[in-house]
Image (cartoon, rainbow, N blue to C red):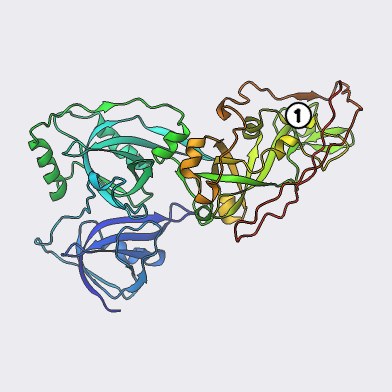
Amino acid sequence: MHWNLKVRVIRLWIVPDKFKPEIPYSLEMILQDEKGDRIHASIGKTLIKHFREILYELGVFRMNYFVIAPNIMKFKTTTHKHKLNFTVTTNVKEIQDPSFHMDIFNIRTFDKLTIHHNVDETELLDVVGHVSSYQPIQQIKQGDNSSYFINIVLENDNKNRLSTTLWGELADQIKPHLTGSADEPLIVVCQLMKAHKFRENYSVRSCWYQTKIWINPNLPQPTKFKDRLISSCDYKYERLSQTSSQKHHSITDELSKGVVSFTYLSDLLQCYEESSFWIAAKIVCLELDHGWSYLACNNCITKVDTEGTKYYCKKCNSEVKSIIHRYRLQLSVMDGTAFISILLLNKETIQLLGKTAKELKEGLLEDDESSYPTELGDLMEKKFMFKILIKDSNINRKDNVYKVVNFTDDDTLLKEFCHPDLQDSLNTPIKSSISECATLITEDVIDLTTKISTKSSKVAGKSTRHEIKDDLNVKQPSNKIRKVIKKEKNT
């Protein structure tokens, strides 16, 4: 299709290569014509050198000869149903046109970011306001990676406020201005932000490489906003106030501020970026093909190898004198949209059960390796909010097991986030407060230099089997639930 466009580049950014961040993967831009209509355009890595020296932000150009493609981006920068792909035949020529307007922002007013309006959270938007307060820059660790962000509050000329989260370099960009002169308001335009709903309120946050912040810009729209703000009869500018923030976020804070997003499992399986998410799911199967605990070296917490009656640690490269039982519990969960496998390691499993792995081991018949504790069976059909990590191995090595780093069985959050298919019943809480569980529990170290006495009384209990309801047209987990055998207490 031959399109001949006269447009202004209102936003331009580079997307780096995922595996080699120093190398550009694509050049992305938003084009706007004289009527204000917009379309997204992309330039592949092999053509970046050809166009990079020609194109720049806010420049006006004539362009033609594109490949027209459907706009199916996860986060849409425009509402146009198509996007443009540059090719070797695409022509670009800069032109000078002072009459071409500079209204480059698609401003979303704060009153449109409420539950009374239909807000598409996949559509990126622009907001403008003056900064009324802010919190210190905060860091968060996601697996092996760490990132940082700052929370600011934007206020409009009607004194409506909007919580705004800026990640990474954007936090660095705004920080010097927050402690600067107090002679006039700090006007900020946040371009291409994501809307985020939590309960009855919306906030906005930056979106990867797309977002740009304009601080006190000399452009028509923010200038008009500043004039309205200052001319307000009840306006009185005050120095920016810094509000306190806790070092560790509560689960509600993470969800409300968009620090960690909630997602359904069907969407999680389509994620191809390393990140963390909260999910709400029901435990439907114990995946015990590789057991639920292991013996570790007490020095380095690495799994030990057994040779007869001796234990060896490859990391320490020596025989182990003391070992410790540690959890490695793999579960299958579902949320009404899909199934996944999750992995709880030692800390999380102790918090979940309130007992160490050694305590559970002591209640089993020692000569029956196929048994598992009743405490694990009690987890079946329970619902939890799990915070899980998506790591490189999940994306590129087809590892279908996701690590759990936090969880809760809070009924209020479950009611709010559970898929409708899971709303039929609520948990009977396993503990009065999960966060209080196991905080004083210490792990039991086994000293191999001391003779260990064992009880000889072994009584097999009844085996149990948990049925999985076939309420979804998806593949059920194949792992068989194994029998539960407990020792009979001596009386």
Q: Amino acid at mark 1?
A: Lys
For mark 1, does the 10 Å Cα neighbourhood hold few (<14), some (14 to 19), or many (20 or more) residues?
some
Q: Could you say which is closer to the camera, residue 242 or residue 478?
A: 478
Observer-nearest residue: 280 or 152? 280
Q: Position of residue 420 (x, y in %)?
A: 50, 50
Query: Residue lying furthest bottom in this view?
Result: 1
Is 213 on the left or on the right of 455, as rendered? Answer: left
Q: Answer with the quarter of the image where residue 438 lies.
A: top right
- The residue pinned by badge 1 equals 358
* 441 versus 280 height, above or below: above
Decide: is 328 above or below 133: below
* Residue 156 visible in the picture: yes
Residue 459 spot, x, y in % from top left: 88, 33
Furthest toward the front, the residue is 424
Residue at left offset 10%, top offset 31%: 234
**In what quadrant of the picture does the C terminus appear?**
top right
